[in-house]
Image (cartoon, helix red, strand yellow):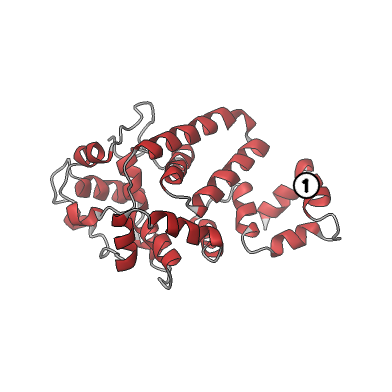
Amino acid sequence: MNWLNRLQSIPFLQYLWRRSLYLQHQQPVQELQAMPPMQPFLALMAGDSSLEIVGDLSDTLLATPSFQQAVTVLQQDPAAAALIAERYMAPPHDLDALLRYPPDSLGHIYALHMKASGFRAEDLYIDIPIQSEASYLEARLSQTHDIWHLITGFSTNVVDEIRLQAFHLPQFPYPLAVALISSTLMSTLLFSPDELPTLLDAIQQGWNMGKTAKPLFAQKWEEHWDKPLATWRAELGITPLSNIPAASPVL
């Protein structure tokens, strides 16, 4: 568990474990590990941002009241409430078929993006059993995660991923977004403090864009693959930040 060794070497965290979190216990690190959400959170802090770790964190958060609160907030929007009640999930995305859409369409651009990245949306949600409103919310967000990247114009580098997580929060209090932002902030504070201003700017930019945009969650993107990406953005009130480099393709 290399991430644990890395964290244990930091004096600040040694002090935090010893004095603030578990003052009455003899084995603070082991007890911290025993808390289900903390192990993947600490791994993220130490720099392990693999899909497996993010998935583990998401799984542990699903049972928390915070996830139900996110559902409750979304249900205040009639369109989102209807989607949750229906538990709408689109069929798996056929990237080869989507490439036959017009070059400026969401479907075509999405297919190019996914083929360039080597990922499939199914890899993110196929193992999420939809057994509750909270698990449905996580499955649908996972299915559409890369669509949100394209709509907002955020690439898939670390800073833009945090921009996207911050974009979620004024739209609804997504627990995984809170966890990813906070773990990245702590990781940056401890290991790359010179990057803090850039990260804080990204959080502010994502938040502001999410606050002014129309709700993204309730969109049935897959039923309108042919709609131009620019039209989607105009309808949703999103103007991509021109100073953000695109990972693939240039949008």
Horizontally, residue 132 falls left or right of residue 15, namely left
Q: Position of residue 139 (x, y in %)?
A: 39, 63
Q: Nearer the viewer, residue 21 or 102?
A: 21
Amino acid type indicated by mark 1: Leu
Q: Which residue in the protein does label 1 denote?
A: 16
In which quadrant of the rendered image does the C terminus lie?
top left
* Label 1 CA crowd tier, 10 Å (few <14, some 14–19, many 20+): few
Compared with 183, 204 (above or below) is above
Give how far across and how far down residue 52 sits, in percent: 51, 60
Residue at 77% in and 57% down: 29
**Label 1: which secondary element:** helix
Taking depth in this image into account, of 66 and 96 the one nearest to the observer is 66
Q: Which picture quadrant has residue 208?
A: top left
Going by the image, does 31 lie left or right of 40?
Answer: right
- Give the percent coordinates (x, y) of residue 84: 34, 63
State the residue in front, 187 or 172: 172
Quick check: can you spot residue 195?
no
Q: Give the vertical position of 190 relative to 94 (above or below).
A: above
Can residue 185 be seen in this snapshot?
yes
Residue, x 39% and y 30% (percent of image)? 244
The quadrant in which the N terminus is found is: bottom right
Could you tell me how many numbered marks the image carries? 1
The residue at 49%/58% (across/down) is 69
Left or right: residue 189 compared with residue 178: right
